[in-house]
Amino acid sequence: MTPKSSIPLSVLDLSPISANSTGAQALRNSLDLARLCDRLGYVRYWVAEHHNLPAVASSAPDIMIGQIAAITTNMRVGSGGVMLPNHAPLMVAERFKVLEALFPGRIDLGLGRAPGTDPATSYALRRRQGISEEDDFLERFQELMLLETRGYPAGHPFHKVVAMPSDVALPPIYLLGSSDYSAQLAGQIGAAFAFAHHFATFPADEAMRLYRDSFKPSVSHDKPLAILGTQVVCADTHAEAERLAQTFDLNAVRRAKGEYAALASPEDAAAYDYTPVDRARIAQGRNRISVGSPATVKAKLTALIEVTKADELMVTSMIFDHAARKHSYELLAQAFAA
């Protein structure tokens, strides 16, 4: 087992689907990667919730959390995150209480404010809940907390509603975000905060500062915990990492054009006919990804950690080849080993 890192390392897994594979295989790959990361000393393994995206198989984080927790021993396992607008708060409470009951002290409840999909799919997910044009995250979060604390007053329709199992507390709560509003909201509700540096346009250091300045202790957390989410492509050599990162480049270009597809191979990405605008977009996107050999990646991430004062580094890697993806996490763990 690799020695513990000098900064806690964790994983955000979207179960990426490669063009030569299937969604079912992507989910099995996630189980395989989780076993490896558990052995390598990663402290946390989160799975995402996205819908109607050809490159992402992770649509049901609560199911995957149970599967991953059952085959690992050391890591905390959680959601990165449950997109609260898509779910009734009572359903979220009960599913995560069940997970906490089965794997006590190892489950995280990460919550997201966005639906994690396009408007039509969002409507399909919510059509029987009542659709609001307003951002109703805070209202849903308050409902979740009132169900947990039994805080509804006598006479309220939910006063006698008990999230089961009633003798199990909700796991610790984390708020995912990529903006100044999310950072301040996370602090105000006393949640831990996971900042999505890998796609955010808001500065990570400023988001972390706003979060800490806004933090108020809660039942879930008595002090701030700031996690920095970032994209990494690490390989034995810089040239090999650059080759692998071409998959990320093409995926970013396609998404900017509203084109969604399974992850392309590095060879197909290299053969793509990029426009000058595409290449400018790739250059901009590379500012939010660490690519290179272990020494190069460690230097870039260390500088990012120092600037943001992050308490933990959460790594996602959208790499075409599963073996190369696993090796990237191996090299990163070795690079940061104390």
Image (tube, grey):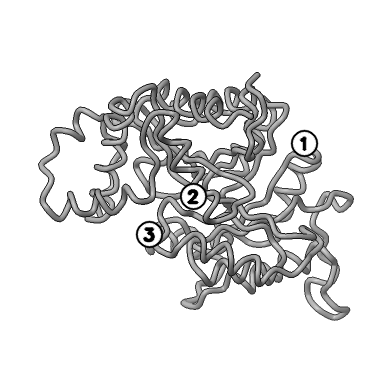
Q: Nearer the viewer, residue 315 or 118?
A: 315
Q: Which residue is mark 1?
A: 103
Q: Nearer the viewer, residue 60 or 213?
A: 213
- The amino acid type of the residue labelled 3 equals Asp
- Of badges 2 and 3, nearer the viewer stands 2
- Quadrant housing residue 88: bottom right
Mark pair 2, 1: CA separation: 33 Å
Q: Bin the neighbour count of mark 2 within 10 Å (Cα to Cα): few under 14, some 14-19, many 20 and up.
A: some
- The amino acid type of the residue labelled 1 equals Phe
Is residue 54 shown left or right of residue 191? left
- Quadrant housing residue 220: bottom right
Mark pair 2, 3: CA separation: 31 Å
| Mark identifier at residue 304 | 2
In contact (CB < 8 Å): disc 1 and disc 3: no
| Mark identifier at residue 338 | none
| Residue 112 spot, x, y in % from top left | 56, 59
Q: Is residue 233 above or below residue 150?
A: above
- Of badges 1 and 3, nearer the viewer stands 1
Q: Bin the neighbour count of mark 1 within 10 Å (Cα to Cα): few under 14, some 14-19, many 20 and up.
A: some
Q: Nearer the viewer, residue 11 or 98?
A: 11
Residue occupying the point 79% across, 65% down? 218
Is residue 162 shown left or right of residue 308? right
**In the image as oriented, which residue stretches furthest toward the bottom?**
155
SS for dot 2? helix
Q: Bin the neighbour count of mark 3 within 10 Å (Cα to Cα): few under 14, some 14-19, many 20 and up.
A: few
Residue occupying the point 59% across, 52% down? 310
SS for dot 3? loop
Image quadrant occupied by the C terminus = top right
| Mark identifier at residue 118 | 3
